[in-house]
Amino acid sequence: MTDTTLDGDETETRTGAIKIHGPEAFEGMRKAGRLAAESLDMIAGEVKPGVTTGALDDMIREFVLDHGALSATIGYRGYRHASCISLNHVICHGIPGDKLLKAGDIMNIDVTVIVDGWHGDTSRMYYAGEPKVKARRLVDTTYDSLMAGIAAVKPGATLRDIGRAIQTLAEGQGFSVVRDFCGHGLGRVFHDAPNVVHYAEYKDRWGGVHQAPDTELKPGMFFTIEPMINEGKPDVKLLKDNWTAVSRDKSLSAQFEHSIGVTEDGAEIFTKSPKGLDKPPY
Ligand code: MF3
Ligand code: CO
Ligand code: CO
């Protein structure tokens, strides 16, 4: 996902026009989205206690290469892996490595592939063994909030409507919406305009009000929706590796992501699971 902080050379994409894509682009996104989703289907049977996150990443990297595609994250701003694997209180951008999964862990696995130049970006939650009831409720709510966000997508609705649907659902269950990372336009570009924030409005600790833009959705726009929902407070801390984002209060965090296209009457999900493995348990 995109860090909402602007830095220099990104200003152009962030303030740039939102691209409107045609039928061939939809075809390209269907292929890329499908492969990304298939890689998440493939990994579902491999997530269990005793496996390392690095081993899971190796399987994803090989799966993508075996299908003649590229991993968009390898070489992206110095990142070196085919996936991000974010365990428990890690919100996003967890780096795969020699960490062993243990029973009760929950994790997000996020994959972005490039097929014929088009980006398919998707993530799901996974369980190693049996998670606690509260963890399952967080995961279910996060999935529901993604799907509520997608249900709000249609021509004439706005980016703020997406954020409202997500925020209402998550806060209704007593959880919080992470504000420091957002969804993003994508297509031939990995992270493009617009920023897709997952709230409608919030007040910061100085009392400043932050509102999602009321940008109108139009057929042919492509973007991700990828809400990160925390069990506790929404605040983020970045670890010293400069990638791993954790919840400041160490509470559990969950995320799901789809890449979608706005159609004449709603949204087309490019990254739906071909095997129906939409959310755990699988
Ligand atoms: N796939 C992530 C997203 O949803 C981006 C990961 S960038 C990486 O946008 F470099 F951390 F892999
Ligand atoms: Co994304
Ligand atoms: Co992603």
Image: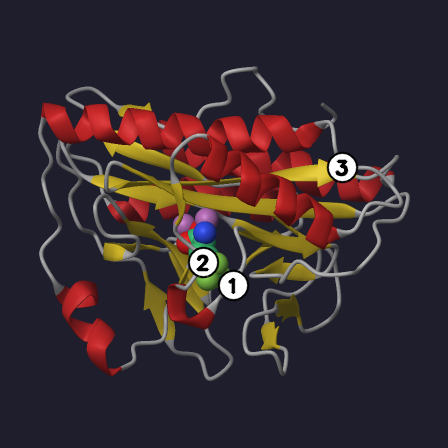
Is 214 left or right of 152, judged from the image as shown?
left
- The first of marks 1 and 3 along the sequence is 3
In what element is the residue under mark 2?
loop
- Residue at (91%, 43%) from the top-left corner? 103
Q: Quadrant of the N terminus?
A: bottom left
How far separated are the C-alphas under marks 2 and 3? 22 Å
Residue underneath mark 2: 74
**Is label 1 in contact with label 2 (beta carbons under 8 Å)?**
yes
Specify few, some or many for label 2: CA neighbours under 10 Å numbering under 14, 14-19, or 20 or more.
some
At label 2, the amino acid type is Ile
**Does the numbered disc 2 mark a residue whose Cβ is under 8 Å from ligand 1?**
no
Residue underneath mark 3: 47
- Residue at (63%, 47%) from the top-left corner? 58
Is 108 left or right of 168, judged from the image as shown?
right
- The first of marks 2 and 3 along the sequence is 3
Across and down, in percent, residue 120 comes to 36, 38
Q: What coloring was used for the rendering?
A: secondary structure
Residue underneath mark 1: 80
**Is label 2 in contact with label 3 (beta carbons under 8 Å)?**
no
In what element is the residue under mark 3?
loop
- The first of marks 1 and 2 along the sequence is 2
Specify few, some or many for label 3: CA neighbours under 10 Å numbering under 14, 14-19, or 20 or more.
some
The disc placed on residue 131 is none
Asked whether residue 243 is in view, the answer is: yes
Across and down, in percent, residue 242 comes to 55, 78
**Does the numbered disc 3 mark a residue whose Cβ is under 8 Å from ligand 3?**
no
Across and down, in percent, residue 74 comes to 45, 58
| Foreground residue among 203 and 259 | 259
Q: Is residue 82 above or below residue 262?
A: below
